[in-house]
Image (tube, rainbow, N blue to C red):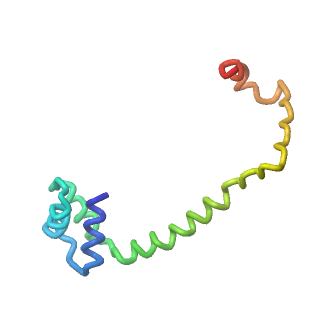
Amino acid sequence: MEYIYAALILHEADREISEESVTDVLEAAGVDVEESRVKALVAALEDVDVAEAVAEAAVGAPASAAATAETEEPEEEADEEPEEEEPEDEDEDVSGEGLGELFG
């Protein structure tokens, strides 16, 4: 991730994202730089509009968090008694038959 962060820092500072500049940022942060990873990052970002990619990622993040919050079930309140589960028919799902004995 630190390689991506270095590229984002350079972008935010309006500096060119080059092998030399990424290496300089990483070395300044005390990272042991792998030249092959730097080359791969710079090559991968060659045709990428970083500003657009960041904007798209920022737009998607709140929507993802909201979707996750909507799918979570609310916790049961302490003063409510939990509903009793009805026993399943033996003919229905027998794939887990006998598993209860392992935990009993």
- Residue 2 placement (x, y as % from top left): 28, 59
What residue is at 28 percent from the left and 68 percent from the top?
45
Q: Where 2 sits versus 60, above or below?
A: above
Q: Position of residue 14 (x, y in %)?
A: 25, 81
User: Which of the 4 image quarters holds residue 17?
Assistant: bottom left
Residue located at (71% from left, 53% from top): 73
Q: Is residue 54 left or right of residue 34?
A: right
Name, please, the residue furthest toward the bottom. Answer: 14
Q: Position of residue 9 (x, y in %)?
A: 27, 72
Establish if 51 lies above or below 33: below
* Residue visible at 17% across and 53% down in the picture: 32
Q: Quadrant of the N terminus?
A: bottom left
| Residue found farthest to the front | 79
Query: Foreground: 96 or 102?
Result: 102
Q: Position of residue 16 (x, y in %)?
A: 20, 76
Is 12 drawn above or below residue 43 in the view shown? below
Q: Nearer the viewer, residue 38 or 104?
A: 104
| Quadrant of the rendered image containing residue 38 | bottom left
Identify the image quadrant of the C terminus: top right
